[in-house]
Image (tube, rainbow, N blue to C red):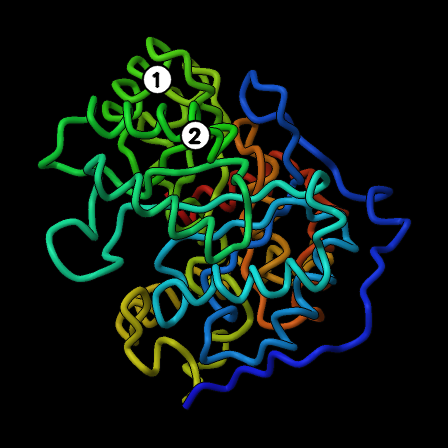
């Protein structure tokens, strides 16, 4: 059943205090400043969700200085519904603030049936950006990402498609996501030759998932691009949700694709120990996990999801304490490396 109230509620006027506390970081060597915390619309913005809740999260985010909203063509469920709901809410609340927003979307995963609705062909990417702009009710996005490498399409074809999307005025900048170090270097070389502003890599990164430190961070530094970290809370592991067991309503209990009972059980002692460090810092585990990422010198922004304004407000408090002692970092490394 679709639970989606598209009725009007009161007119939104953004907080005049919205830029007073947020910190903004330069994305690589570009002219773009991104908020330290960005909002991802992967969950809680589809047709199965309450539109009024989604609306309150977006309003809260912008009032807190979060100017970057991140989407993808297949976010939902169903596919496309997060972009469509965002378009509805953009028209209601954010139309007058478009030049203060930094919007992104992506293509690279399964989106529609048949051979042209997935991966990284020129046909798929051009069709996808056109569909995304229509759903989001935008003339352009600020960043268009290739969501994952395509092993069967020449990288040159994919990068030329991204370049043409910029030249057609459908995106201002391009990014990539889930690319390994060697692939990132090759993509950067092609985009530089095409004179396309390649400004960011979106990578999975958390205290418990540090694969980017095995070469990718060095590449990001050398190529002078930004890094935005997704899954900073390891799909909920780095929260207080599992400290006393596995709740029946949790993702792990439902054997979610990205988190299952075995994975939680294998990491339970780690998260309990990390929680003790967080408590000594006067933080919740989730806040410390975000703070730790923001303390990494090459992380431009941390991409958070939110199920409510209250959750977002709680996690953004991580900005108040991003300094770590040498002892704390040594303890965290001993647990996570």
> Which secondary structure, mark 1?
helix
Q: Which is nearer the eye, 156 or 301?
A: 156
- Count neighbours of disc 1 (C-alpha within 10 A) and say few if under 14, some if 14 to 19, many if 20 or more: some
Q: Which mark is residue 89?
A: none
Work out whether 189 lies above or below 73. above
On-image quarter of the C terminus? top left
Work out whether 287 lies above or below 172. below
Left or right of 12? Residue 134 is left
On-image quarter of the N terminus? bottom left
| Rendered residue at 52%/40% (across/down) | 141
- Residue 237 in percent (x, y) is at 44, 65
Q: Quadrant of residue 186?
A: top left
- Residue 256 in percent (x, y) is at 31, 73
Left or right of 148? Residue 36 is right
> Which secondary structure, mark 2?
strand
- Count neighbours of disc 2 (C-alpha within 10 A) and say few if under 14, some if 14 to 19, many if 20 or more: many
Q: CA distance from mark 1 to mark 2?
A: 9 Å
Residue occupied by mark 1 = 191
Q: Which is nearer the eye, 10 or 332?
A: 10
Left or right of 255? Residue 238 is right
Left or right of 25? Residue 249 is left
Q: Which is nearer the eye, 171 or 210?
A: 171
| Rendered residue at 40%/40% (across/down) | 203
- Residue 35 in percent (x, y) is at 67, 40
Q: Which mark is residue 174?
A: 2
Of labels 1 and 2, earlier in sequence is 2
Q: Are marks 1 and 2 in contact (CB under 8 Å)?
A: yes
| Rendered residue at 30%/25% (across/down) | 184
């Amino acid at each position: 059943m679709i639970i989606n109230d598209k009725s009007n509620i009161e007119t939104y006027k953004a907080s005049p205090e919205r830029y007073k506390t947020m910190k903004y970081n330069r994305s690589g060597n570009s002219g773009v400043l991104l908020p330290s915390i960005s909002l991802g619309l992967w969950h809680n913005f589809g047709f199965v969700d309450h539109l009024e809740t989604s609306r309150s999260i977006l309003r809260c985010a912008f009032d807190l200085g979060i100017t970057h909203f991140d989407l993808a063509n297949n976010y939902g469920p169903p596919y496309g519904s997060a972009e469509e709901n965002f378009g509805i809410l953009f028209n209601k609340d954010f139309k007058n603030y478009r030049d203060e927003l930094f919007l992104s979307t992506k293509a690279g995963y399964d989106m529609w049936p048949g051979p042209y609705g997935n991966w990284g062909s020129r046909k798929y990417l051009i069709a996808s950006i056109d569909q995304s702009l229509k759903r989001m009710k935008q003339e352009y996005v600020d960043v268009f990402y290739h969501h994952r490498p395509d092993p069967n399409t020449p990288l040159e074809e994919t990068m030329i498609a991204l370049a043409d999307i910029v030249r057609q005025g459908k995106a201002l900048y391009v990014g990539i996501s889930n690319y390994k170090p060697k692939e990132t270097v090759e993509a950067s070389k092609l985009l530089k030759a095409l004179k396309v502003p390649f400004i960011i890599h979106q990578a999975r990164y958390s205290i418990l998932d540090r694969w980017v430190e095995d070469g990718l961070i060095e590449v990001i530094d050398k190529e002078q691009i930004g890094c935005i970290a997704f899954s900073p809370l390891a799909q909920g592991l780095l929260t207080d949700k599992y400290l006393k067991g596995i709740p029946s309503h949790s993702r792990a209990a439902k054997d979610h694709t990205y988190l299952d009972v075995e994975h939680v059980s294998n990491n339970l002692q780690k998260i309990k120990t990390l929680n003790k460090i967080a408590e000594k810092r006067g933080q919740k585990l989730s806040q410390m996990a975000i703070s730790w990422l923001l303390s990494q010198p090459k992380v431009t922004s941390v991409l958070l999801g939110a199920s409510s304004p209250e959750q977002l407000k709680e996690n953004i408090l991580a900005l108040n304490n991003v300094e770590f002692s040498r002892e704390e970092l040594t303890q965290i490394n001993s647990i996570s490396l």
